[in-house]
Amino acid sequence: MPRIFCIANQKGGVGKTTTTLNLAAGLAQLGQRVLVVDLDPQGNATMGSGVDKRALALSIYDVLLEAAGVADARTRCASGGYDVLGANRELAGAEVELVTLDRRDQRLRDALMSVTSDYDFVLIDCPPSLSLLTLNGLCAAHGVIVPMQCEYFALEGLSDLVNTIKQVHANLNRQLQVIGLLRVMFDARITLQNQVSEQLKAHFGDKVFDTVIPRNVRLAEAPSYGQPGVVFDPGAKGAQAFVAFARELLQRMEKA
Ligand code: ADP
Ligand code: MG
């Protein structure tokens, strides 16, 4: 049974997709079999893996509507060494179409059952909302990894997400837990970021990952080459931090 994790934060632009792709590539380098599920109609995780979202024959949309299985719809990120269940704008329609269907929030979970023996990790890149799509991610997952920037309003946004996770845990998915908070785009020269980082540790203790992902332009450049940063420039500080994060996550899983 793979570990299934959502990369979630209802804010946009906080580093969810960057975390998903680089963690996937980092875990793949450490010998893990990984599936990335793109659950965002923007399709950034798809494109950032070198898969053209406009050319997808089958996507997560078809899977959620039970028109295709995961095994048929997945593609490969050759550079990153992981599989991708891609998304494009079609997925935005699924939100509406799912509402009237039965098991509407369990569709992803049901679909992933058919590929459990193929993977050690499934990483779900969530959209920037607490929508039915995100709910499908949370119902399918064992845990949530929350990337966050250490900014003034970071803690405030976090309470909505933590409440949603609690609700899902209580009502829909007893397995769900917060795996950890990942500090991303961190700039140690900025006093406020250090202060917020300390607050996070005070509030959340060892739920805060030890690894910190620095702000690093090579990570931002990589998607336009269709590669995770970890592969695009392995020597860059950001890439090395993500490999360290993959290693930390594996160690935590062994202890758990
Ligand atoms: P989300 O998926 O939460 O919307 P992204 O992962 O797409 O966020 O990141 C938002 C933007 O910030 C992207 O342009 C991305 O390349 C950039 N970015 C993410 N992480 C870093 C980082 N550590 N250093 C520099 N730029 C980053
Ligand atoms: Mg994204």
Image: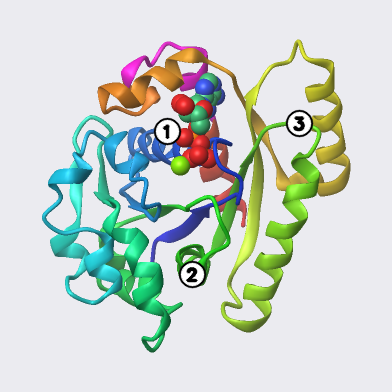
Q: Position of residue 197 (x, y in %)?
A: 79, 31
Say which residue label 2 marks: 132
Q: Secondary structure at mark 3?
A: loop
Which of the numbered marks, if any, corresponds to residue 148?
none
Tell me which residue sits at (60%, 68%) in the image.
Answer: 176
Q: Secondary structure at mark 2?
A: helix
Task: Name the foreground residue: 102 vs 28.
Answer: 102
Secondary structure that dominates the magenta span: helix
Image depth: mark 2 or mark 1 in front: 2
What is the three-letter code of the residue carrying label 3? Answer: Glu
Vertical relation: 121 (above or below) 226: below
Tell me which residue sits at (27%, 22%) in the image.
Answer: 225
Q: Does 185 lie within the magenta span? A: no
- Please tell me how crowded label 2 is: few (under 14), some (14-19), or many (20+) other residues with Cα within 10 Å: some
Give the residues in magenta.
232-244
What is the three-letter code of the residue carrying label 1? Answer: Asn
Say which residue label 1 marks: 22
What is the three-letter code of the residue carrying label 2? Answer: Leu
Q: Position of residue 255 (x, y in %)?
A: 61, 52
